[in-house]
Structures are given as C-alpha cells and as structure tokens.
Image: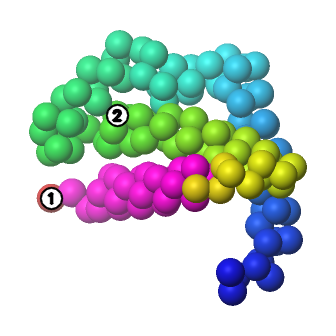
C-alpha cells in the first residue's frame, strides 16, 4: 500500500483513458474509415483473418507487415481489454472494491499486449535484407 499516494493520479489517468476510449469507439462505429479499421482489428474481414493465419503459421517470416495481420488482432484484443479495464476502474472508483483483482489482472494482460505490439512494430520497421 506504499503506492497509495498515486491513487488520485491513477483515477484522473483512468478517467482520461475512459474519454479516449469513448472517442475511439465512437470513431470505430460512427465513420466509414472507423468501420473499415474495426473490420481489420476485430478480424471481421476474411482477408485479415487469412493474413493472421498465414503469419501465425510462418511466425512473421512470410514477408508481409505484421501490422496488417497479427498486430491488428493484438490491437483488437487490446481495445476490448482496455475498455473492460476502464469500466472496472470506474466501478472501483464508485466503491466496488471487490473488482480490484480483476482490474489488476486485466492491466497485466494489457501490459503484455503492449509489449507484443512493440515487438511487432520493431520487427515491421527493422531493415529488411
């Protein structure tokens, strides 16, 4: 509990994240470009699904950009988990203290997905021979 002094900052940070996610979901559902992006990151298009399967089988060695396949799937999962984490955080702020383990667990998964996204980005931008 030595980190309790960070709680006010974390609450403000969580509320800003909630506003950002509300804007993200509004854009994804409310515009044509957003719906195309949603189809890509939530694997709603057959092209993206095939690309993800091909990259998974070849572990990114097939020459295609990971951001168009595996990283798109990671982004979709990240967006869903971030949304649930923010909702749990707001419920915690409102007094539902029994949700803290779930909030922390999802936050740990978000960290792992973020690291995976960074790895995919580094691989995509690494000079090819």
Residue in the picture at 12% in, 39% down: 58
Residue 11 locus on image (x, y percent):
82, 62
**Mark positioned earlier in the residue sequence (1 or 2):** 2
The Cα atoms of the two marked residues, 1 and 2, are separated by 21 Å
Does 90 sit left or right of 25 as displayed?
right
Residue in the picture at 79% in, 72% down: 7
Residue in the picture at 33% in, 38% down: 70
Residue in the picture at 19% in, 29% down: 54
Q: Which is more toward the observer, 8 or 126? A: 8
> Where is the C terminus found, in terms of image quarters?
bottom left
Farthest residue toward the front? 98
In the image, residue 14 sits, relative to residue 88, either above or below, namely below
Where residue 77 is drawn, which disc sits there? none
- Residue 94 on the magenta segment: no
- Residue 114 on the magenta segment: yes
What span is in magenta? Answer: 102-128
Does 8 sit left or right of 66 as displayed?
right
Where residue 69 is drawn, which disc sits there? 2
The answer to whether the residue labelled 1 contacts the one labelled 2, judged by CB atoms less than 8 Å apart, is no
Q: Which residue is mark 1?
A: 129
Q: Is any atom of residue 35 visible in this view?
A: yes
Task: Give the prevailing secondary structure in the magenta stretch.
Answer: helix
Residue 118 locus on image (x, y percent):
42, 59
């Amino acid at each position: 509990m030595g980190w309790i002094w960070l709680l006010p900052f974390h609450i403000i940070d969580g509320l800003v994240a909630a506003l950002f996610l509300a804007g993200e979901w509004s854009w994804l559902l409310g515009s044509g470009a957003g719906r195309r992006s949603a189809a890509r990151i939530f694997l709603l298009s057959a092209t993206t699904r095939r690309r993800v399967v091909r990259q998974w089988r070849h572990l990114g060695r097939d020459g295609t950009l990971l951001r168009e396949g595996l990283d798109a799937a990671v982004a979709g999962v990240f967006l869903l988990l971030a949304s649930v984490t923010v909702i749990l955080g707001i419920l915690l702020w409102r007094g539902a203290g029994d949700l803290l383990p779930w909030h922390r667990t999802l936050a740990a998964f978000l960290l792992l997905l973020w690291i995976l996204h960074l790895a995919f980005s580094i691989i995509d931008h690494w000079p090819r021979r």
